[in-house]
Image (cartoon, helix red, strand yellow):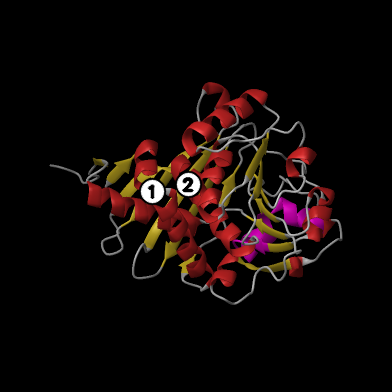
Amino acid sequence: MLVLDGAQVRQLYPMERAITVMADAMRRYSAGQVSLPLRTILRPAGETGLMGTMPGYVSGESLAGFGLKAMMLKPENPARGLDLHIGVVLVFDKETARPLAMMDASAVTAIRTAAVTAVATDALARPDAGDLAILGSGVQARSHLESIRIVRVPHRVRVWSPNAAHVRDYVKWAWETCGIEVETPPSIEATLKGAEIICTTTSSKDPVVGAADLTPGAHVNAVGASFVDHRELGPEAVAAASVFVDSRESAASESGDLLGAINAGLVGSEHIQAELGEVLLGRHPGRRDAGEITLYKSLGLGVQDIMSGFAIAEAAAAQGIGLDFSLDNHR
């Protein structure tokens, strides 16, 4: 079994490759080539953290087989200088079922989430969209700038976060790493005004985006609210948009953004236009006109981690990277 740390994952899984793999993952999911139970969330009483597990099976000629992500969310970690999300992705050899590779899940999640957002943006945003607004200044805010610039040419980038120090670090990182100048408006409203592509990557439990913040023709990637009790978009904002999801089943059970609009009586479950994979398969046209507001609600699926895990393991074997560790008993 190969063991890979976060730096090795990032080395082996460049964003361009991840975008290609994630487009394939979403097509396979909507084509019925994936077996995935809903993720299990464990929140013990008195414990500040939680554990999520996402097992699954992916069929196909490549990047296929059984896999699992086990992820911990620990709110105290950022103050310790550690990632908020910590865990592992495991993939198993398709023929023998032996563990093939175990890798840092934080790095996998950061890359694959942003890569799926890029796939959604490429499929749903206007071809000329280049005014990008990002809410949040953490790991996902960084990886989303890296991914969006691959599918659209940003002519303006704005970022907002309640943490001024993080914003300053983000601006410095964006220039040094991406060669992109980032503006820092004083409010969410100013950040979103006129934005053509919006990525919300916050940890907010309460809505931060209202319908009035959305410009006609905008495309929104709602990424941060990945639990049923978290919301980044107000119900009117969700109702004003054509909603696309990674999974109808997951969205109906886990999306606080969507359920907030449904519970407010503004929309029904039919407000979901299609899964992203259905758009990629040509089963839904996606955006219908230049003035339509499109919303991709990202929750994250095990197939994204599993196919990423196989792609990373494949690259690691080819390049001779990683610690080779045996689970066999030696006598």
10 Å crowding of disc 2: few (<14), some (14-19), many (20+): many
- Image coordinates for residue 188, horizontal then vertical, percent: 76, 38
Q: Look at 55% across and 55% down and name the residue there.
A: 118
- Residue 152 drawn above or below residue 72: below
| Sequence-first tag of 1 and 2 | 1
Q: What residue type is labelled 2?
A: Ile
Q: Look at 80% across and 54% down and name the residue there.
A: 237
- Residue at label 2? 111
Q: What stretch is highlighted in magenta?
A: 244-261
Residue 258 belongs to the span the image colors magenta: yes
Which quadrant does the C terminus fall into?
top left
Residue sitting nearer the eye, 252 or 225: 225
Report the disc number at residue 13. Answer: 1
Q: In this view, does 198 lie to the left or right of 85?
A: right
Q: Is residue 28 left or right of residue 165?
A: left
SS at badge 1? loop
Secondary structure predominantly adopted by residues drawn in magenta: helix
Q: Look at 53% across and 33% down and name the residue there.
A: 175
- Image coordinates for residue 317, horizontal then vertical, percent: 24, 50
